[in-house]
Image (cartoon, grey):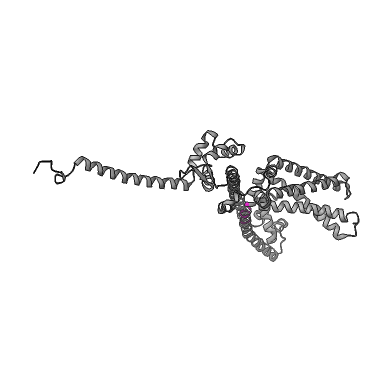
């Protein structure tokens, strides 16, 4: 869905990549990897100070911290506010497009809460006391939310961001896995609970005492379900559950419990792991393709200097030696020597220039191995070409046959002087 939204946003309005930047120099500074690196380093340092301050308060059982922590909080609040304002000033209406809607809103909320906390401490901090319960609760809540600032570093690390995105995209599979697991535990739990209930009823009728271990693990539906979950997750050794069933009821029930553990550990968990791995790989591929589309979008906008919506051979050659173009070509496993051949391949209509759709679509097709749709299109084009060749060969054969036979006698013109 993200890829479709990116493609529709980029192709629906060609002017989207032809809008000039408000301040090209300022935008290049903000978009530079060095700027992101400094921002990430400051986030790490801020995270360390947050943890150090929490450790100090816990060890000394006081909310009074050294002035170094207070100064650092004000410093980081100002720096992160300036960083956010700088990105707004550089990208303006394209801020959420550059940072992503979710990350943009997250940055705004975190920085906003940090600024609000500092403002509250500055306005009411000097006059606040333990009787001002509302103020104390608000400040404590804002301090707890400070830990979310650590998550901002995820946006600057592709590998870490890929892991987080993969986990978030696997939440749907996790939900249905938990539903399946709950249904299985519930069904087996009802079976053992009813079995133990019948056992206890028979023991009460005969005046005998119950097995305390059996009642502990299977005395009710909730305890049975908890015991079954612990047996498959390592919370309780499943032998401890099987022994009272075998000793008090029947060895067959120990075999039933063994089958449940084997199914849960060997089958269910492995299938769940495979589902998560598949979802993570799919999410990583989609995220990589989305980043590639963004890079191609920026490359086309920088190369299209005259904002005509098309790249000529001259424009393409002029930007071949730039660092950005080399990075894009390296991502497609294309070197500089093969770049002009790439341009000829992308120029499907042979006009000597390529538009946005030809550039982005062609470059995305060059990544990775051929897809099924590519093979089908190639097979279709081969069949069409073969059919046209057969028709052309048939026409040529007919013309050659007519030339070899010569004209009919009635069609031969009489020589001059013949009657």
Q: How many marks?
A: 0
Q: Position of residue 395 (x, y in %)?
A: 28, 45
Q: Quadrant of the N terminus?
A: bottom right
| Any part of residue 231 in sight | no
Left or right of 277 in this view: 216: right
Left or right of 335 in this view: 404: left
Q: Position of residue 45 (x, y in %)?
A: 78, 42
Residue at screen point 61% across, 39% down: 324
Residue at screen point 41% across, 48% down: 380
Q: Position of residue 3 (x, y in %)?
A: 58, 51
Nearer to the camera, 126 or 393:
393
Left or right of 281 in this view: 419: left
Residue at screen point 83% across, 52% down: 118
| Any part of residue 44 in sight | yes
Magenta span: chief secondary structure: helix
Nearer to the camera, 135 or 217:
135
Is 172 contained in the magenta span?
A: yes
Q: Quadrant of the C terminus?
A: top left
Nearer to the camera, 192 or 391:
391
- Furthest residue to the bottom? 205
- Furthest residue to the left? 419
Q: Position of residue 126 (x, y in %)?
A: 90, 54
Give the residues in magenta.
Answer: 169-176
- Furthest residue to the top? 337
Is 209 contained in the magenta span?
A: no
């Amino acid at each position: 869905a993200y890829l479709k939204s990116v493609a529709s946003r980029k192709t629906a309005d060609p002017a989207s990549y032809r809008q000039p930047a408000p301040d090209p120099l300022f935008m290049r500074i903000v978009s530079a990897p060095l700027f992101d690196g400094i921002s990430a380093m400051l986030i790490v340092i801020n995270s360390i100070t947050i943890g150090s301050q929490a450790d100090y308060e816990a060890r000394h059982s006081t909310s009074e911290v050294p002035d170094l922590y207070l100064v650092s909080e004000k410093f980081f609040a100002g720096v992160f506010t300036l960083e956010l304002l700088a990105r707004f000033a550089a990208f303006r209406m394209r801020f959420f497009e550059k940072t992503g809607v979710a990350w943009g809103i997250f940055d705004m909320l975190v920085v906003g809460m940090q600024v609000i906390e500092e403002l509250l401490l500055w306005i009411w901090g000097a006059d606040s006391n333990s009787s001002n319960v509302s103020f104390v609760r608000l400040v404590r809540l804002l301090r707890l939310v400070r830990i979310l600032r650590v998550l901002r570093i995820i946006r600057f690390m592709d590998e870490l961001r890929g892991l987080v995105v993969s986990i978030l995209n696997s939440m749907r599979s996790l939900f249905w896995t938990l539903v399946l697991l709950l249904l299985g535990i519930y069904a087996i739990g009802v079976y053992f609970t009813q079995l133990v209930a019948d056992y206890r009823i028979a023991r009460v009728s005969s005046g005998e005492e119950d097995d305390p271990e059996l009642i502990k693990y299977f005395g009710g539906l909730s305890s049975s379900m908890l015991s079954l979950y612990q047996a498959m997750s390592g919370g309780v050794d499943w032998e401890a559950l099987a022994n009272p069933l075998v000793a008090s009821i029947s060895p067959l029930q120990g075999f039933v419990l063994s089958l449940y553990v084997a199914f849960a550990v060997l089958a269910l968990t492995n299938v769940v792991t495979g589902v998560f791995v598949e979802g993570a790989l799919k999410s990583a591929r989609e995220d990589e393709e989305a980043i590639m589309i963004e890079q191609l979008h920026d490359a086309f906008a920088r190369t299209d200097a005259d904002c005509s919506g098309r790249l000529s051979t001259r424009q393409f050659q002029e930007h071949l030696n730039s660092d950005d173009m080399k990075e894009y070509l390296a991502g497609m496993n294309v070197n500089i020597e093969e770049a002009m051949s790439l341009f000829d391949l992308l120029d499907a209509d042979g006009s000597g220039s390529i538009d946005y759709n030809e550039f982005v679509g062609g470059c995305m097709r060059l990544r990775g191995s051929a897809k099924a749709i590519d093979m089908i299109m190639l097979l279709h084009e081969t069949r069409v070409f073969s059919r046209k060749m057969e028709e052309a060969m048939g026409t040529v054969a007919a013309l050659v046959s007519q030339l070899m036979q010569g004209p009919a006698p009635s069609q031969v013109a009489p020589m001059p002087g013949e009657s």
